Image: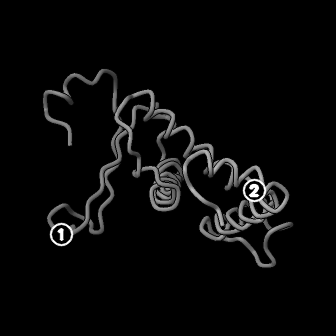
Amino acid sequence: MLSEAEISRLKGTRNIAIVMNASTFKDAEDIDYFITNFKPSLVTPQWIVETYSQRNWVEVFYREVKGWLGLKEYQVRGLRSLKRHFILVFCAYTFILWHKLTGGLRRRWANKPLDTFPEALEAFRTAISFRFVEWLNHNLDLFTSYKASLGYIWA
């Protein structure tokens, strides 16, 4: 919530839309305020509905990257490392969503529709697992040598 001092520092004209579930403030139980600096000629009721209904996709994005791709699971402290983590998460999300929307994952790795992000992510994990096992079958000696160099035994 902005303080009065912060609000007074804002430059330019602001347009506000008040949405409530009753005809008066006194009777309203739910009141939402939408503030924008777009031109008054553009800010019509239709524009407000269309613009703010698109906001839900931002919330969906953050819920998915936090819950499925570990956006909040970083273990670094430096700004550069944080940026790298965020970039990797955003790239992974974009890659998986692109495959979901274009049908790329479904064509090869699923025999059902991939309607949700978790379903697309599972198809992606299936593809990665398959590729790793296939690589491991052809390169077992290399993998065993690598593990041995770290002091582990692959038996």
Q: Residue furthest bottom?
A: 112
User: Do labels 2 and 1 touch, CB within 8 Å?
Assistant: no
Give amino acid for label 2. Answer: His
The residue pinned by badge 1 equals 27
- 154 vs 32, left or right, is right
Among the 4 quarters of the image, the one containing residue 112? bottom right
Q: Position of residue 58 (x, y in %)?
A: 49, 51
Q: Which residue is mark 2?
A: 99
Q: Where 120 sits versus 85, above or below?
A: below
Residue at 14%, 35% (x, y): give it. Answer: 3
Along the line of sight, which residue is nearer the eye, 139 or 31?
139
Circle nearer the viewer, 2 or 1: 2
Q: Residue 12, relative to residue 45: is it above or below?
A: above
- Image location of residue 12, percent across then percent down: 34, 22
Q: Quadrant of the N terminus?
A: top left
Q: Residue at x 18, y 61 (%)?
A: 25
Q: Is residue 67 left or right of residue 77?
A: right
x and y, in percent, of residue 30 in the image: 25, 65
User: What residue is at 51 percent from the left and 48 percent from the top?
Assistant: 51
Q: Amino acid at mark 1?
A: Asp
Residue density around tag 1, few if under 14, some if 14–19, many if 20 or more, within 10 Å? few
* For marks 2 and 1 on the same chain, the one whose residue lies earlier in the sequence: 1
Percent coordinates x, y for residue 60 in the rendering? 50, 59
